Image: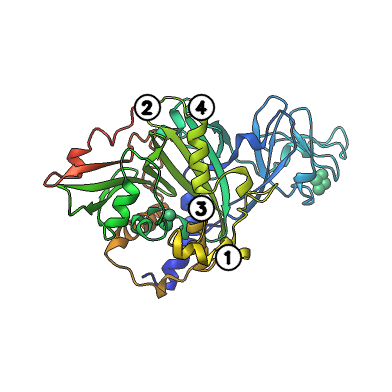
Amino acid sequence: MLSQAINQRITRTGPGTPMGLTMRRYWIPAMLSAELPRPDSDPVRIMLLGEQLIAFRDTTGRVGLVAHNCPHRGASLFFGRNEESGLRCVYHGWKFDVEGTCVDMPNEPAESDFRTKVRAVAYPTVERAGVVWTYMGPGDPPPLQTQEWMRVPAESLDVCKHLGEANWLQLLEGGIDTAHSSFLHRSFLQSRARTLDTRGFRARSTAPKLEVVTTEYGYTYAGIRALPDQDSDYVRVYQYVLPFHQMRAFEGYLGHPLISGHIWVPADDESTWVWSWTYTGGGEPLPAEVIEAEKRSAGRLPNDVVPGTFRFRRNKDNDYLIDRQKQKTDNYTGIDVISAQDQAVQESMGRIFDRSQEHLGTTDVAIIAARRLLLQACDDVEADRDPLGSRLEAITARPAEMLVPRGQHWHAAMSEQLVATV
Ligand code: FES
Ligand SMILES: [Fe+2]
């Protein structure tokens, strides 16, 4: 349970808010590189941490991310002309490069130096792993921090983003809550052939013991499920990387174990960019049929999305297409795909849940630990200290899952599996 004041502190991310200032000390995924397909392609509106921004790719391929209001009299640069290495406002012709420098001011006398006194708000960007990253904080940006999925070859990786219609923290907490998968994602149908029947384990052993180990980037935590008819426990180990990343091992499809994860980035305080990435742990290419199977089950195929948007077709306006007959015969929810099952419960809590009304139990310890770290990070930023992990250049941790012989500790038994190889 959080007081309303603390709930406010941890959920609000707009300019000047404690959590907003904290998030702005980390690199943030802003958009897919593919949203700006070519030099001088059309500018794109991006909402990030409550700021309305315009992204454009200039003639040389660099990505600019600028405040949408032109610094002259505020017209939106969305309507701008993307030409000759700059975005030109269509109201009076002022032109800005990717750094926000005003490079032309054709409505002022030629001898005027007013141009040199005006800048557009512009955030630095870097492209990596098919994603445009930005740093919206003060001072020089730290190096872009990489995780293993950002270092593997492009053919081993799939990255996509969708829109969630609730506060970022609700979605993050849904992701790091390992206990819910025993219920929310339970299927009554024969599951596909898997290397480990992990979904079966989660259905049979519904009260995992959670252990959280704090690290230099966030924490490693294990959901330990006793399997009474076996002499091992099923242990699923996740990584939480401040402020909004999670990695999880995944049983995979068609014999290909996968590593996947999410990033939950506030668009504003009531909607969230949900990034999903998946790669093959060994660096081998990700077969098209494997990623197709993954997207089908998750509900992230192109026809799961409203055309021209990042919103899912199954959404709160249609109760995520719940089928009460299927709820009796097919699966726990009657909702077809995993992402819609998650969004149904996370969004049903309301746009920003009032955590003074909750009652946390023993399987919520990872959520409690994440809140502690986030609030500590806010305190650190207020005291002008770097928040946890913000200056780390590379995360070398991995998630993993395995059957750990009873009597062994997961941390020792899985020490090799928990380290990235790329
Ligand atoms: S408002 Fe943009 S140039 Fe005048
Ligand atoms: Fe889930």
Please tell me which of labels 4 and 1 falls first in the chain. 4
Q: Secondary structure at mark 3?
A: loop
Q: Which residue is mark 2?
A: 282
Query: In the rendered image, which residue does mark 4 sit on?
Result: 154
What residue is at 31 percent from the left and 53 percent from the top? 202
| Identity of the residue drawn at 53% across and 38% down | 292
Observer able to see residue 13: yes
Q: Are marks 4 and 1 in contact (CB under 8 Å)?
A: no
Give how far apart the Cα atoms at labels 4 and 1 are.
36 Å
Which residue bears the numbered disc 3? 337
* Rendering coords of residue 217 (x, y %): 35, 43
Q: Earlier in the sequence, mark 4 or mark 2?
A: 4
Gap in angstroms between the C-alphas marked 1 and 3: 13 Å
Decide if residue 205 is on the left or right side of residue 336: left
What is the quadrant of residue 363 in the picture?
bottom left
Kind of residue at badge 2? Gly
The image position of residue 129, as x and y in percent, is 52, 32
In this rendering, the label closer to the viewer, 2 or 3: 3
Check disc 1 and give the amino acid type. Asp
Of the residues shown, which amino acid type is indicated by label 3?
Val
Q: Which residue in the protein does label 1 denote?
A: 319
Mark 4 Cα shell of 10 Å, populated few (<14), some (14-19), many (≥20): some
Q: Earlier in the sequence, mark 2 or mark 1?
A: 2
Real-space CA distance between mark 2 and mark 3, rounded to the nearest whole angstrom: 27 Å
Looking at the picture, does residue 368 appear above or below residue 237? below
Residue at 50% over, 26% down: 155
Q: Could you tell me how far apart the alpha carbons at marks 3 and 4 are, in whole angstroms?
A: 26 Å
Mark closer to the chain start, 2 or 3: 2
Horizontal side of 295 relative to 47 (left or right) equals left
